[in-house]
Image (spheres, rainbow, N blue to C red):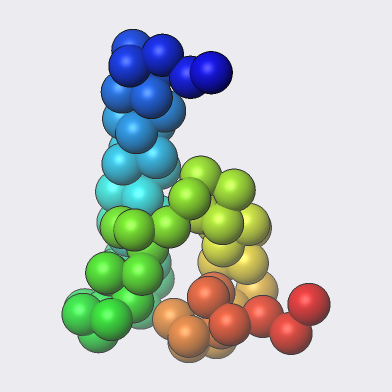
């Protein structure tokens, strides 16, 4: 069972990773659509990490989130 502190720390890590990904995407692509920003902010850490790797090969912001895995 996850303690309150563990959950709080995990949530902080997720928020930090989301902020970094958003910053990198905005640097590469410019202003992002609100739906992309919202999706990243509410994603789990695993998704954010996967999307972060896709940033290297993406041509448009949508490519980061919508890979054909």
- Residue under the point 33% across and 12% down: 5
The quarter of the displayed image where residue 58 is located: bottom right
Q: How many marks?
A: 0
Q: Is residue 3 left or right of residue 15?
A: right
Residue at the image point whose x is 36% and y is 69% from the top: 39
**Which residue reaches farthest front?**
1
Against 6, residue 7 (above or below) is below
Residue situated in front as seen by the camera: 32 or 42? 42
Q: Would you place residue 11 above or below residue 66 in this image?
A: above
Location of residue 6 by image quarter: top left
In this view, 61 is above or below 18:
below
Position of the C terminus by quadrant: bottom right
Give the residue at x 38% y 24%.
7
Q: Is residue 14 visible?
A: yes
Q: Position of residue 12 (x, y in %)?
A: 31, 30
Q: In front: 5, or 59?
A: 5
Residue 56, how many percent across, how many down?
A: 61, 66
Question: Which quadrant of the structure image shows residue 66?
Answer: bottom right
Q: Position of residue 2 (x, y in %)?
A: 48, 19
From the viewer's side, name the closer residue of 13 and 61.
Answer: 13
Give residue 36's position: percent from left, percent from top: 33, 76
Q: Residue at x 33, y 16 (%)?
A: 4
Choose between 67 and 26: the one closer to the eye.
67
Determine if residue 9 is in view.
no
Give the left or right position of residue 33, taking residue 54 as reference: left
């Amino acid at each position: 069972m996850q303690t309150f502190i563990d959950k709080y720390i995990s949530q902080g890590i997720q928020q930090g990773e989301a902020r970094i990904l958003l910053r990198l995407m905005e640097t590469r692509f410019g202003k992002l659509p609100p739906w992309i920003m919202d999706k990243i902010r509410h994603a789990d850490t695993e998704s954010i990490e996967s999307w972060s790797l896709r940033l290297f090969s993406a041509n448009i912001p949508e490519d980061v989130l919508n890979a054909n895995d």
